[in-house]
Amino acid sequence: MAGIFITGTDTDAGKTVISTALIDLLKQKGLRVAGMKPIASGCEVTESGLRNDDAMQLIKHANVELPYEVVNPYSFQPAIAPHIAAQYVHTKIDLNFIQQQFEQIQQHCNTVVVEGAGGWFVPVNNSQTIADLAKLLKLPIVLVVGIRLGCINHALLTVEVIKQSGLPLLGWVANNVEINAQSKEIVSMLKHKISAPLLGEVPFLSDTDVAADYINGDYFV
C-alpha cells in the first residue's frame, strides 16, 4: 500500500489520533512509514519556524526521518480555514507542489499516511478542495467519524461524495471524541448504512497513543 489518505467528517473528528494509530499499526508490520500533513492551520511560532502539533505528532510516530517542511509544506498561524489563512499571507496553496513533496516522501518509505485538513470539501484555494488533493494523490481513503450529535448525517454525506470521486473507501473508524450515551446506537446505525468496513471503534481516550489497540490492522496489508 503506497499510502492512505485520512479524512474526517469535520474538524476535530480525530484525524490525527487515527493517523498516528495507523502509522503505529503499519510499523508493527515491519514497514517504513512516514506521515504527511500537507496543509495545516493553527501553527505555533517557534525558533525553527511555524510548527503544527498535528504534523509534529505524525513525525513523532513515523519511523522515517524527514524535514518538517516536507511533512507539512503549507503551514499557517491562524486557526482558520486554510484558504483564508493562505490569503492573509498572500499565498496560494498549490496541489501540484504537494504532490511533488508526497512523491519525495515516497522515495524514503513503504507507506505514507496523509492527513487531510478539516472535512472532505474544505477549500484549499478558490477552485480546489481537500477532495481534489486526495484525487491527485490517488490514495485509498479512511474516513474518521467523530462520534457526536449530528455525525450520522455528516458521515453518510461524506461517504457518498467519496464514492462519487472514484477513490476506494478502505473503511471508516468510529472515534468517540466525547462521552456520549448514544454512541453504541450511532455506531450501529452507521454500520448498517455504510458498506465499507468498520476498521475500529476508538473509545474516548485520555492517552491517545493507545488508539492503535482499537483498530483492526488486518485491513492494512
Image (tube, rainbow, N blue to C red):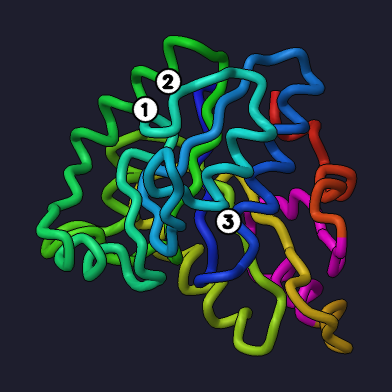
- In the displayed structure, 101 sits above or below 12; it is above
Work out whether 202 lies above or below 99. Answer: below
Tell me residue 196's x, y (percent).
64, 53
Say which quadrant the C terminus sits in: top right
The residue to which callout 1 is attached is 102
- Tell whether label 2 touches label 1 (CB within 8 Å): yes
Q: Quadrant of residue 150?
A: bottom right
**Residue 57, position as x, y percentages in the image:** 63, 44
Residue 105 tag number: 2
Asked if the stretch drawn in magenta spans residue 98, the answer is: no
Under circle 2, the secondary element is helix
Task: Tell me which segment is drawn in magenta.
Answer: 186-206
Are the two marked residues, 2 and 3, in contact with CB atoms closer than 8 angstroms? Answer: no
Cα–Cα gap, marks 1 and 2 = 5 Å
The span from disc 3 to disc 1 (Cα, nearest Å) is 20 Å
Quadrant for the N terminus in the image: top right
Residue 100 pos. (x, y %): 26, 25
- Horizontal relation, residue 64 to residue 89: left or right: right
Residue 78: image location, x then y, percent: 35, 69
Q: Which mark is residue 5?
A: none
Q: Which residue is mark 3?
A: 143
